[in-house]
Image (cartoon, helix red, strand yellow):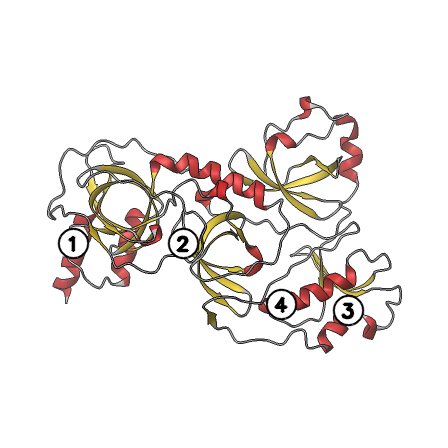
Amino acid sequence: MVTSEFLVSRPFCGKGCLARYKGKWSRVEITNLHGSRVLDILFIDVGVQASVEVFELREIPPPFLRDLMAIPPQAVKCCLADLAVSVGSWTPDVVQWLREKVLNTTDCSMKVAKVDETKRCIYVHLFTDKNFHDPARSLNHQMAQSDLFKQQPDVFLTSHSPAKIFTTTLSSKGPSTGDYTNGSPMSTSSPAKPHLRRILSGPRGGNKTTTRPLGTPSPPSSSLQLPPLLEFPSAGSNIDVYVSVACHPGHFVLQPWRDMCKLVVLMGEMILYYNKTEEKPLNIEKDQIYAAKVENSWHRVLVKGVLTNGLVSVYELDYGKHELVSCTQLRPLIKEFRQLPFQAITAQLAGLKPRQWSEEAAIVFRNHVEKKPLVAQLEAVQEATNPWDRKLMVFLVDTSQEERDIWVHDIMAEFAEELTNEL
């Protein structure tokens, strides 16, 4: 009997242990860690992937360790051979056709075409009967000769997209429940926060302005309740922030430190919830809010555009990044995950004249601020109808050095002046 005394105390990627599958303890391998609480596992004997909390895992009891380690994994990752099609060609019709052919079929057989050791994948010709001597009877041949893979042009749509992408892992027991990959660094744990000193001296240059509204774009048509807005202090106040994205001084993305722990908890809860839910048909619409799987984590996203090849352009509302994901990786954003304000806030650097920043200047700026905890002194808030359209004007200050505070706008002003003098 596996008891609590075998709780896994030090999980790491590649570790073998036990987890429950359909009520029975089964062998698993840890494939990814989301901080110290949530992790992804692979049931190595059935090919099923899942996300669990660390307390759900158990060490393999010593009496069974040698025998269980000697038995090779019983699930084998396979790929259909000789199908020269692009990823976007796996439309819902293709996926449905393949599922109807192979799921719950007891007489399947296969012929190995190639073994790719680097990808740990076997390329096979798949048959739904025992007659694997006739290549023309393979599902590979049937799919290649059909019209299932008619390619559509990549065009942005304003509403729906019919296309999907499908990846599968074949095993002796059944299909995989999902594909769980790595998330962004900020989705698993907060970066180390330095001691932030209170800034006593104001910025050199730049006057504080009053709040001014932006244009008012059309609100989302969805009736879903949006999270409350992030609250900001008055102009001149200091905010501890993390710069998640930095393009140039005129456009970067901040995350407030005060809710960083809440965001980490939210990301873990979303992984546990969505990795256990089955994929269901979903009408994806532009300018709507969803949960999307990006790499290995689930994010709250805004759909910016839909492609006919099954990909969706999304904006991560908590991290400020733009990504392309499969439309099969989107889910409705349930009410429980719409309580925390969206954490990404667009900003521009105060104390500088508006200008077209060169790539060289953008690199200098990124090196000073991106993926770093800083202090932001609030200059102004530009309000907007949608929370993701709000914008801050701030001074950024690096307080990590003992001797002095570094005002980033001073660095960029000096750099811009040097470039002007060179011209």
The x and y percentages for residue 385 are 31, 54
Q: How far apart are the two marked residues, 2 and 3, measured between alpha carbons? A: 39 Å
Q: Which residue is drawn at 29% across and 51% down?
A: 390
Q: In which quadrant of the rendered view does residue 304 lie?
A: bottom left
Residue at the extreme front of the image, as rendered: 223
The residue at which mark 2 appears reads as 321
Mark 4, secondary structure of its residue: loop
Amino acid beneath label 4: Thr
Residue 139 is labelled as 3
| Sequence-earlier tag: 4 or 3 | 4
The x and y percentages for residue 39 are 58, 39
Q: Which residue is drawn at 77% across and 25% down?
A: 1
Crowding around mark 1 (Cα neighbors within 10 Å: few <14, some 14 to 19, many 20+) is: some
Q: How far apart are the two marked residues, 1 and 4, measured between alpha carbons? A: 49 Å
Q: Is residue 188 visible?
A: no
Image depth: mark 4 or mark 3 in front: 4
Looking at the image, residue 340 sits to the left or right of residue 199; the answer is: right
The residue at which mark 4 appears reads as 91
| Sequence-earlier tag: 1 or 3 | 3
